[in-house]
Amino acid sequence: MRITTIGVVAHPALNEATPVLRALAEHLRARGARMCLETRSATLLDGSLDEPCAVSEGPDVVRRADALVVLGGDGTLLRASHFIERNEVPVIGVNFGSLGFLTEIMPSELLPAIDATLAGDYPFEERRMLRAVIRSAAGVEEQGDALNEVVVSRTDLMSRIIELDVVVDGLFVSSFRADGLIVASPTGSTAYSLAAGGPILHPALHAVVITPICPHTLTHRPLVLGDDVCVEIWIEAAEVEINVTLDGQRSIPLTPGGRVSVTRSPRMLRLVRAPKREYYEVLRNKLRWGETGKRRETPA
Amino acid sequence: MRITTIGVVAHPALNEATPVLRALAEHLRARGARMCLETRSATLLDGSLDEPCAVSEGPDVVRRADALVVLGGDGTLLRASHFIERNEVPVIGVNFGSLGFLTEIMPSELLPAIDATLAGDYPFEERRMLRAVIRSAAGVEEQGDALNEVVVSRTDLMSRIIELDVVVDGLFVSSFRADGLIVASPTGSTAYSLAAGGPILHPALHAVVITPICPHTLTHRPLVLGDDVCVEIWIEAAEVEINVTLDGQRSIPLTPGGRVSVTRSPRMLRLVRAPKREYYEVLRNKLRWGETGKRRETPA
Amino acid sequence: MRITTIGVVAHPALNEATPVLRALAEHLRARGARMCLETRSATLLDGSLDEPCAVSEGPDVVRRADALVVLGGDGTLLRASHFIERNEVPVIGVNFGSLGFLTEIMPSELLPAIDATLAGDYPFEERRMLRAVIRSAAGVEEQGDALNEVVVSRTDLMSRIIELDVVVDGLFVSSFRADGLIVASPTGSTAYSLAAGGPILHPALHAVVITPICPHTLTHRPLVLGDDVCVEIWIEAAEVEINVTLDGQRSIPLTPGGRVSVTRSPRMLRLVRAPKREYYEVLRNKLRWGETGKRRETPA
Amino acid sequence: MRITTIGVVAHPALNEATPVLRALAEHLRARGARMCLETRSATLLDGSLDEPCAVSEGPDVVRRADALVVLGGDGTLLRASHFIERNEVPVIGVNFGSLGFLTEIMPSELLPAIDATLAGDYPFEERRMLRAVIRSAAGVEEQGDALNEVVVSRTDLMSRIIELDVVVDGLFVSSFRADGLIVASPTGSTAYSLAAGGPILHPALHAVVITPICPHTLTHRPLVLGDDVCVEIWIEAAEVEINVTLDGQRSIPLTPGGRVSVTRSPRMLRLVRAPKREYYEVLRNKLRWGETGKRRETPA
């Protein structure tokens, strides 16, 4: 697929992104590619962009683009990712400040990454998404994909604990009395699941992790399964409000007697990689594991 | 204070409580004490109680009683406790099935406990409550007490993390990025705080524990402080909905720029104790620590 | 491979095993199979076994057997497993009392399982082992396999913390300051790793988990990787005594400047399965997750 | 008590301490105070100290001093603290690099702190120690104090789990199957106990925390008790080697049938405080909680 239109989504409060945005626009023009900027992100330019550039709404920018540049951190990329419709769209996540799990390209590495992308010869990594199908007791179905995680949790503050039955490939696993339950992909294992006490899953692992949120039964521990399973979560007839949330971006109410099934989605996100950056470097950086210089050299 | 009116609150679905309720009514009549039954609980009797007995709404029953009998588990007792207005009202918590942290009296121990209570000579334990004062940015104040815990948490599913500043006795402790924050009493340390990863505080300890809920900063650990401190939680100007919840019974919205302060309340709950039951026995039982008979004897 | 010799290892203090052992001996004789009993286990019979039966030392019994019966719990099976030399030897683990992760056959299920095994038509599961290669600073190598886990830990009580560098497939991951480090297989994920805070890995998952023991850096979390990686653990020049322990069965000192590499072993353990027992049932039972009858039916 | 002799203990590899040591010696001479330097620390000076100064062995230096200066981190101070015999000896802990929980004086703050100490007018904090009494099955007693924690743990790598009975004030609490058990003071709550999953106890709290190390029973959680209790740990008749370790400094073997009791010691450590440093600042710094400048100001 030839890449001619580059969509750009930037965090609108990220003033440091302005010069990068200008340089990017000029760079793309010089190479004959079209840039399409999200309306909100355009505020960073104060209407003063010299280069010809289409401005459009977020979902539209993402849908029309052959490649996507995201300026601004994992949250911004996560939001944009929900509008991508084709697996083969390369996504260049640029961070300002600290490395991100999804945005590992430094601003100085952007233009070389763009050139490689336009040439169709760029290093990338594909991150498998999860598909959630929500069935109400009445049989109505709704579905959506998540890059990080599917969360089933109570909305109601007054009834602290909800009871959820987990069934994997038709086999009953356990009832969980908890604030909720997270089904996370390897990509999502370093997000909400980690805060809830889950392990880190290497992105190359074909797995999901089921992590309970504040489980009442203290022996409930995160459970890691192959990503070829179907995880079903059943809701007891309950008076509490329960919701299914995808990547913290989209929320769907779950009625008593309803259930959610989570499987591997056919959707994948194609992340453009920085040339010499390792996953473990991002991990050390984000989790502040610290590193002693000498050690990094020794084992080489 | 002479005890003449005994309030009774029972879980309305607890059919095993019916014979106990009847025996209690007869017992009280024979001793010349008045029984006052909560309207909802009266359904357990199908209108067939022979003994004269006032029936009234929950809050009213609790307010008029010189002593309170609760049939049905920690949840029922917790709910009733919020209507008690005087520290010296003895509360007899009767469990059906498994020991409760608050309901440690077995049905067979109820009538002797009643006699001791009527005679004014009963073993008891006083559980200190927490007082929460919620101040809006505009300066409006609202206040309430909690036996177990004060929880500050987001209501909003779409924005996962909230940022809270904790200040103790005027000293900044830390900013917490988390789902929320629990300030629990020793009594509450075995409830929600435990599910969130908090330690168990012995009820005799004059302390509170601040337990973060799913903290984003992985080094945030539960912090135990003396109960003579003032814990303040400040909310950043935020777009997310945040609520303060007392014992999962009462919920108050917290507006941006608002804050909550938690201190020791002048309110205490007077729990009637079972004659020979130890705290550790309840702990082993509730947390399924298991116990080997021989061991319980050995160290005696 | 025809099965003619059945090795039997029983926990020598397990008196309940005596009638099972007798019945097994008679059953095997009737089918023309030879039974070979471990010397220590023979004490259960007080020398009174009528059936002809070879008695021999543990390692020898295991090595000679075409199939192995273990009476007595996961510990006994783990110990015996270290002497098995061929992947295709079926192992029948019989528990007395509670289900085991490795011993899921009930005594009443033993004889049918034996018949199926002798007929060469039995359900089984293969559990992949880990191979540890320990290299001293001087270049001397020693190696061993582990079904559950490889543990690197200090022996010295006086110096609490050791510093270990973890390198995966040649990439530096992090330095761990901790009591030690566990590399566990899915089978071992419910053993020591779980006690150290690790997640549960489904046995069908091709993965290992690196779980730190009491990490000084509070952000160090268990890390799950594919089982096709090579995990290396490097020891700094240190004055503390450090040991590598395989399944808690065999311990090898690690000298300063030494390192351990852990990979998937070519060795697997072939566990005979109970006909209708699911992994999740064992999990619920062992971890006391509790289960409500109705729920187990519902999702079927 | 008049302060005339200042003992000095420095980490012998801490070259940055040399100029501080020289300045201190000169400062003390000018004020007519005697300095007594530990033999090992004297290597930092290469024998070239101009000022008259007694050099002596560690324990001796500490015992003779009216006040103690420690240069070099919490570990060095912990080691030195075991030789202090009187509660009223002020200890000035100077850190080089990062703040310590025990060494919160910066090098630039040392001389003013010395002057205040010589004048007998210095801010300080008293940290209560724990007393461990170890009784063998034969009735032999040995005793020792710990500033941080008393640890009961196995020495044996081959038998992973030990079984310990905990009895508090004569009441059986639970049997713990674990790698070991930590009884920590508030001071020690940020050391080994934290790594094992324990909570942080504010130093002003009169409490101890019992933290299990890798508990096999997953519901075992840290238990916080008042420091007026007697915590007894009983050892079953076992074949494994078990040791009691005080602050990681002193280790005493525990024979089968033996037990340890831990109570509040009459010993306290008097730590000289930095004028305007708060406990929470040290906490944020040591645990890398991070702090946003604006927030530190806001709530003032």
Image: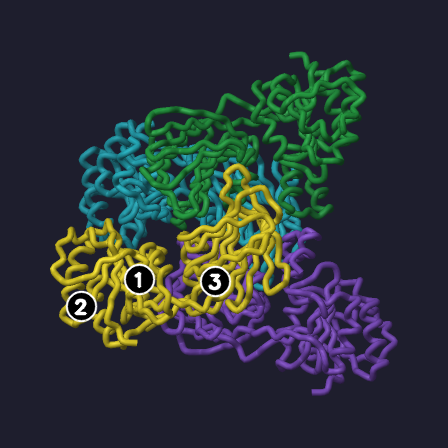
Chain colours: A green, B yellow, C cyan, D purple
**Identity, as a three-letter code, of the amino acid under mark 3:** Arg
Q: Is A11 on the left-hand or right-hand side of C147? A: right
Task: Using the image, name the chain to which the residue with label 2 belongs.
Answer: B
The location of residue C300, given as percent across then percent down, is 29, 31
Secondary structure of the residue carrying tag 1 is helix
Q: Earlier in the sequence, mark 3 or mark 2?
A: 2
What residue lies at 63% left-to-right and 69% top-to-bottom?
Answer: D78
How many C-alpha atoms fall within 10 Å of the one at disc 2: few (<14), some, or many (≥20)? many
How many C-alpha atoms fall within 10 Å of the one at disc 3: few (<14), some, or many (≥20)? many
Residue A147 appears in the figure: yes
Q: B23 or B260, which lies in front?
A: B260
Report which residue position mark 3 lands on. Answer: B131
Q: Is D216 on the left-hand or right-hand side of A294? A: left
Q: Is residue A241 above or below residue D40?
A: above
Q: A140 or D187, which lies in front?
A: A140
Task: Using the image, name the chain to which the residue with label 1 belongs.
Answer: B
Quarter of the rendering occupied by the N terminus of chain A = top right
Report which residue position mark 1 lands on. Answer: B62
Q: Is residue B62 above or below residue C247?
A: below
- Check contact, mark 2 vs mark 1: CB within 8 A: no
The location of residue A154, given as percent across then percent down, is 42, 41
